[in-house]
């Protein structure tokens, strides 16, 4: 797909993968004004597509690249891109810096958790240490980094008025014609409910007008969307906790299946699922299971410590 012009200074660059259901799912945000910056770069496999899209928008220089987190689908291509746009600042959570300098553990972890999908994404390449900046101390280019652990402990969101680049701190968003939108939590293990909710509150506090999701698109009424997602998390917690009392063996496949069935039935923000094509539904079921697993492990830990 071609870059999507959201506003004169904002573009969404789709990074479609050679995987069924991974169209209009991974993207990079380009902000082009007095300063030019990217938020997330996608995996290595689509860096040529990203570069082609940047040329199409006449981007010859990038001041900074902001990474919401260092998962392979958001940051896997940063090593490849960094050599093409020196000396752009590369900003991420402080704990991610050493892994981008030496990405061997990132690549090993991606292979272990994603298997063939990781191979399709392509391996990480190292980033020069002198290009990397800790988001917590970064105060250039009028962008505000906000620490938002929850989806991952190294997750950071970025705010430049009126846009909030939320990564996955506000869930996974899909525009669905005819029913408005689909919104799903992104809560893989190790998920800590209170930390995730606190991160949402941090985002609400800056009062953004528009929210730009890592997956996939932008919507108005950012504060209301964040509050809606917060309510959704409490609903998931209630449903999954109830199902765990019915299926006390947490490794039981029936627990996962029953959670998925009830969530799709009772969460109104998921009604768009039935409108997806088969490949997209298959993709979403994989991520559903990972998000449900995060809740199950969290709730089990709470029960064990009570």
Image: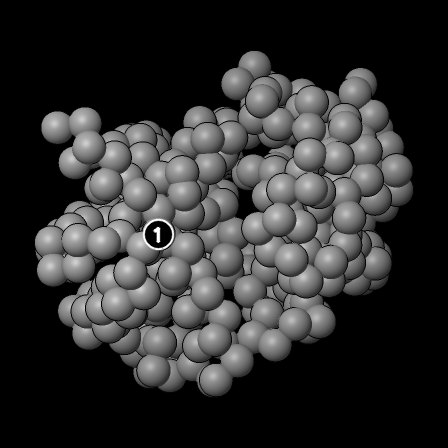
The quarter of the displayed image where residue 190 is located: top left
In the image: residue 221, left or right of residue 51? left
The residue sitting at 68% across, 62% down in the picture is 116
Residue 223, image quadrant:
top left
Q: What residue would you read off at disc 1? A: 293
Q: What residue appears at the point 83 percent right and 44 percent down from the top-left corner?
A: 80
Residue 21 visible in the snapshot:
yes
Which of the pair 86/191 is nearer the observer?
191
Q: Position of residue 9 (x, y in %)?
A: 61, 50
Whether residue 35 is visible here, answered yes or no, is no
Residue 245 x, y percent position in the rendering: 11, 54
165 shown above or below 130: below
Q: Residue at x 42, y 69 (%)?
A: 285
Query: Is residue 102 toward the left or the right of residue 304 in the image?
Result: right
Looking at the image, is 99 positioned above or below residue 79?
above
SS category of the residue bearing label 1: helix
Side of 72 relative to 86 (left or right):
left
């Amino acid at each position: 797909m071609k870059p999507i012009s959201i506003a004169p200074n904002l573009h969404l660059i789709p990074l479609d993968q050679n995987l069924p259901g991974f169209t209009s799912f991974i993207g990079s945000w380009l902000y082009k004004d007095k300063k030019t910056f990217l938020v997330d770069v996608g995996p290595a496999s689509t860096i040529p597509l990203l570069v082609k899209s940047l040329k199409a928008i006449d981007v010859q220089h990038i001041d900074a690249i902001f990474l919401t987190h260092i998962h392979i689908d958001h940051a896997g291509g940063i090593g490849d891109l960094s050599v093409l746009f020196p000396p752009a600042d590369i900003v991420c959570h402080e704990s991610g810096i050493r892994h981008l300098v030496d990405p061997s553990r990132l690549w090993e972890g991606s292979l272990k958790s994603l298997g063939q999908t990781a191979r399709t994404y392509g391996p990480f390449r190292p980033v020069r240490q002198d290009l990397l900046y800790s988001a917590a101390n970064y105060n250039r280019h009028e962008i505000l980094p906000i620490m938002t652990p929850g989806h991952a402990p190294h997750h950071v969101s970025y705010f430049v008025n009126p846009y909030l680049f939320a990564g996955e701190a506000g869930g996974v968003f899909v525009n669905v014609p005819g029913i408005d939108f689909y919104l799903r939590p992104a809560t893989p293990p190790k998920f800590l409910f209170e930390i995730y909710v606190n991160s949402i509150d941090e985002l609400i506090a800056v009062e953004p007008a528009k929210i730009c999701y890592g997956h996939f698109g932008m919507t108005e009424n950012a504060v209301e969307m964040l509050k809606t997602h917060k309510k959704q998390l409490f609903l998931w917690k209630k449903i999954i906790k109830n199902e765990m009392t019915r299926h006390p063996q947490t490794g039981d496949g029936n627990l996962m299946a029953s959670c998925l069935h009830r969530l799709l039935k009772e969460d109104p923000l998921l009604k768009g699922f039935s409108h997806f094509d088969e490949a997209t539904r298959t993709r979403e079921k994989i991520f559903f299971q990972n998000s449900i697993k995060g809740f199950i492990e969290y709730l089990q830990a709470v029960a064990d410590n009570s």
